[in-house]
Structure formats: C-alpha cells, structure tokens
C-alpha cells in the first residue's frame, strides 16, 4: 500500500483531524516515504532503538504513540537529527497517533487498561483541554489493590508507586494512562476507590493519604502499550499487511 492510502485508513477510525487543535502532538504522517508499504512496525516511542529494529524487521513504516514533533519548533540537531536522518536514509515513514489513540473507545489505551483490570459500565473520566481522556467504572466484584496488580501481570517491585491508603477492597476504579498523576484530584472528587495512571509524583502522596484513596502509578510506557498493539491487530486483520510490535520498555 501507498502511504497516502494508509493515512486515509488510519484517519477513518482515529480522530486525528478532530484533535488537531487540542493535542500538542503533531499526529498523522510525521515523515513520509516513497516505497510501497508491506510491513508496519508498531511501537510506543519514536526512538533509534525502535527504528533500528523496525528496519531489521523489514518495515517501511513505523506507527507510534509518541512521535518526534510536539507542536513547537525544533532544531534538527543531536538525537532529533539522527532519528530523522535514519528514517529518511532508510525510506521509512513515521506515523503518529497520540491523543487519538489514548481516547479511542475500542482500541485506546485507557479503555484497554480499564477492561484489563476488570472495570465494567465504563464512563468518561478526566478532562484534557476540554475533552474526555480517561474512563471510570465499577469492578465486577470487590477486589484488593494487590490483586489488581497481579491480574495485570505487573511485578509490584517494578511499579513507580503503589499508594494503598484507601479501602482494602475496591468497588470503583478510574484510569488515565501515561501522565495522569495530577488527575487523582478528579478521582477523589468522584469518590473513586482505585486510580491507575502511568507516572508518579511526589506531590500527590499526601493528597492520596489524606483523602484515603488507592493509587497505582504503573509506568508511562507500561500503561500505553495497548493502543499500538490493538491497531497492529486491526491492520493485520483488515489490510493483510505484515505487522510487528517493537517492545522497548523504559521502566518509567
């Protein structure tokens, strides 16, 4: 397939145009190529490790959640230069879906993590520049925070933080993947038992303690692998293109 065809395909189910004035990420095609695309590499981050492994896999496109351009002018120097140089010299396209992939109602990071922890009756939760970003819901049965961690297959020692200051058994939960640590205030306002996000913050420790809420900071990367994997599966089923997931965890 040509890059233009794939761009139209991704825009058919990702709200790239609708969020152009909201998301600080420059979503869509960030680097174009000239060759036909028969293999797409999917990854969380646009970094050299991702690009090198994509080349090894024979990919002509890399589809990522975190791209190279973030709504401001950037000098093409240092690692930014090296990344762009690698993509151009290897005729490899870069496609980005940041907020459009976070908020997608079926494929998105937030809804996927919420379903993974067993939340039902999902509703919008949390705002970013006026749009709903996260989800909240109820657990199928009361569940301990440690059990939620185990159900996700997470090693507690690898979490950025687990603040168990609330109920022993959680009835309700809310999710904002990635950098949603400050949104614990919204979870408190809505009487949520367990709040899960990616990043951790020193400032929220006493907020959680004093408001008796449970909070898991599972890592920015770890909470945002879902979306790109879901899109990879969709592409594989609908377009019969080869796909590969490039896993480059940061531990953060």
Image: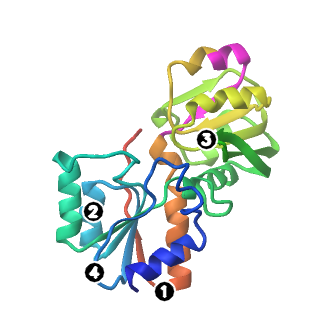
Mark 3 / mark 2, whichever is N-terminal: 2
Which residue is drawn at the image coordinates 16% and 70% (left, top)? 89
Which residue is drawn at the image coordinates 70% and 33% (left, top)? 194
What residue does disc 4 label? 34
For label 4, the SS is: loop
Mark 1 / mark 2, whichever is N-terminal: 2
For label 3, the SS is: loop
Question: What is the spatial separation of the Cα atoms under label 4 and label 2, in whole angstroms?
Answer: 17 Å
Question: What is the spatial separation of the Cα atoms under label 4 and label 3, in whole angstroms?
Answer: 36 Å
Specify start and end residues of the magenta stretch as a single range: 207-219
* Residue 145 percent location from the top left of the image: 68, 34
The answer to whether the residue labelled 4 contacts the one labelled 2, judged by CB atoms less than 8 Å apart, is no
* Residue 173 percent location from the top left of the image: 73, 39
The answer to whether the residue labelled 1 contacts the one labelled 2, judged by CB atoms less than 8 Å apart, is no
Which residue is drawn at the image coordinates 65% and 20% (left, top)? 208
**Dot in front, 3 or 2:** 3
Q: Is residue 215 magenta?
A: yes
Asked whether 42 or 248 is in front, the reply is 42
What residue does disc 2 label? 51
The answer to whether the residue labelled 3 contacts the one labelled 2, judged by CB atoms less than 8 Å apart, is no
What residue does disc 1 label? 240
């Amino acid at each position: 397939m040509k890059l233009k065809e794939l761009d139209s395909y991704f825009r058919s189910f990702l709200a790239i145009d609708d969020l152009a004035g909201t998301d600080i990420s420059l979503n869509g095609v960030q680097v174009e190529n000239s060759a036909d695309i028969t293999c797409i590499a999917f990854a969380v981050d646009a970094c050299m490790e991702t690009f090198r492994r994509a080349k090894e896999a024979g990919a002509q496109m890399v589809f990522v959640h975190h791209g190279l351009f973030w709504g401001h002018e950037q000098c093409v120097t240092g690692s930014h230069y090296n990344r762009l140089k690698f993509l151009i010299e290897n005729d490899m396209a870069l496609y980005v879906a940041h907020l459009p992939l976070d908020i997608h109602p079926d494929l998105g990071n937030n809804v996927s993590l919420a379903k993974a922890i067993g939340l039902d009756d999902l509703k919008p939760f949390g705002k970013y520049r006026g749009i709903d970003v996260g989800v909240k819901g109820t657990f199928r049965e009361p569940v301990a925070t440690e059990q939620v961690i185990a159900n996700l297959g997470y090693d507690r020692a690898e979490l950025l933080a687990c603040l168990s200051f609330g109920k022993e058994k959680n009835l309700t939960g809310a999710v904002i993947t990635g950098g949603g640590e400050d949104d614990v205030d919204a979870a408190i306002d809505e009487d949520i038992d367990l709040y899960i996000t990616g990043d951790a913050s020193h400032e929220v420790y006493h907020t959680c303690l004093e408001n008796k809420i449970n909070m898991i900071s599972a890592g920015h990367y770890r909470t945002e692998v879902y979306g790109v994997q879901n899109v990879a599966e969709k592409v594989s089923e609908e377009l019969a293109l080869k796909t590969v997931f490039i896993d480059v965890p940061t531990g953060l």
